Image (tube, rainbow, N blue to C red):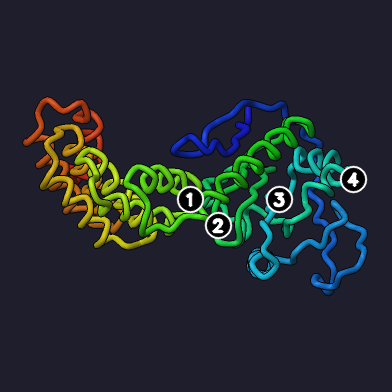
């Protein structure tokens, strides 16, 4: 059965939150009518009585200009549960109230915009609903649809949690944060897929006066992960190499070495990754990660030559 996923601000990633029963009707998802002049401030007759943006780029641009969030309704053709969700949500006053302060846009998952959303937020199911800042920071994400009360409960819960979190983040002067606060906030921003803001705070945690070695190493690994997501592979490699060179924690060193091998994979440097994994097996014969590493080696080693 499909998964119902939502954002948990205390988790390091998006976690499964339950299951739902799908009622496939065979009908196609219905696109909400978009105004020919989306910025005109006049009553409209549409889903949630809102002015739906015509595409992803316009939604983000308008949300940024109006200091609003973006509401992404992610659907597909021949998605019976998409039609069911729309029938339950769109006519309701609760839905109209939810969209206050948001720019809604409908995205087909198999479209170019849908691929962009799917790749960044790991969205694989329809219907899905994503609420995010114009820059892409996750506020709420659910994959699948159970019923309207469940949807509104989780949406409002996560939106309220995000608003409290945003007040803290917006009030921060990163240059003066303690190592603990910078690290904690950086982790939370990473979980919300705001890698740029996360990297700034994790770098501060690394450099903050009085930072403990264990926290500095954890911050360096978090920084490396954020820089990897931003495509800054050289910087990510530098941060991880600092951990390898300085840590006295054997497990931390092993995880840093594996991260470096994964960087090689990310850059399609397969020969370098294979060499790194082989070196890992040689240097860490009792590592708890050996089985996983040997699996990578088996996939990367060239096949036997054909006779």
Could you tell me which secondary element the residue under label 1 belongs to? loop
Residue at 74% x, 45% y: name it: 78
Q: Which mark is residue 193?
A: 1
Q: Which mark is residue 91?
A: 4
Sequence-wise, the earlier of marks 4 and 2 is: 4
Foreground of the two, 268 or 74 = 74
What crowding class fits label 3: few (fewer than 14 Cα within 10 Å), some (14-19), or many (20 or more)? many
Residue 195 placement (x, y as % from top left): 43, 55
Could you tell me which secondary element the residue under label 3 belongs to? strand
Q: How far apart, in angstroms, are the residues tagged by discs 4 and 1? A: 32 Å
Q: How far apart, in angstroms, are the residues tagged by discs 4 and 3? A: 15 Å
Foreground of the two, 167 or 127 = 167
Looking at the image, residue 169 sits to the left or right of residue 285; the answer is right
Sequence-wise, the earlier of marks 2 and 3 is: 3
Which residue was labeled with disc 3? 73
Q: How far apart, in angstroms, are the residues tagged by discs 1 and 2? A: 7 Å
Could you tell me which secondary element the residue under label 4 belongs to? loop
């Amino acid at each position: 059965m499909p998964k119902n996923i939502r954002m948990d601000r205390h988790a390091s990633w998006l976690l499964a939150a339950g299951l739902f029963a799908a009622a496939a009707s065979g009908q196609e998802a219905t696109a909400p009518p978009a105004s020919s002049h989306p910025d005109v401030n006049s009553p409209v007759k549409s889903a949630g009585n809102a002015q739906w943006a015509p595409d992803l780029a316009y939604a983000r641009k308008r949300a940024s200009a109006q200091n609003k969030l973006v509401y992404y309704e992610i659907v597909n053709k021949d998605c019976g549960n998409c039609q069911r969700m729309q029938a339950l949500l769109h006519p309701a006053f609760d839905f109209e109230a939810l969209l206050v302060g948001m720019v809604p846009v409908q995205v087909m998952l198999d479209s170019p915009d849908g691929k962009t959303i799917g790749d960044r937020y790991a969205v694989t199911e329809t219907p899905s609903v994503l609420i995010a800042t114009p820059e892409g920071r996750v506020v709420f994400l659910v994959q699948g649809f159970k019923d309207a009360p469940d949807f509104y409960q989780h949406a409002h819960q996560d939106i309220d949690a995000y608003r409290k979190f945003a007040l803290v983040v917006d009030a921060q002067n990163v240059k003066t944060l303690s190592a603990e606060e910078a690290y904690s906030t950086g982790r939370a921003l990473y979980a919300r897929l705001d890698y740029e803001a996360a990297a700034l705070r994790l770098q501060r945690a690394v450099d903050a006066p009085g930072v403990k070695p264990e926290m500095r190493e954890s911050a360096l690994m978090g920084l490396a992960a954020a820089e990897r997501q931003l495509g800054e592979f050289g910087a990510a490699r530098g941060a991880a190499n600092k951990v390898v060179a300085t840590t006295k924690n054997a497990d931390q060193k092993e995880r840093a070495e594996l991260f470096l091998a994964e960087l090689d994979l990310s850059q399609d440097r397969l020969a370098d990754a294979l060499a790194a994994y082989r070196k890992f097996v040689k240097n860490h014969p009792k590592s708890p990660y050996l089985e996983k590493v040997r699996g990578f080696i088996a996939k990367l080693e060239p096949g036997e030559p054909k006779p």
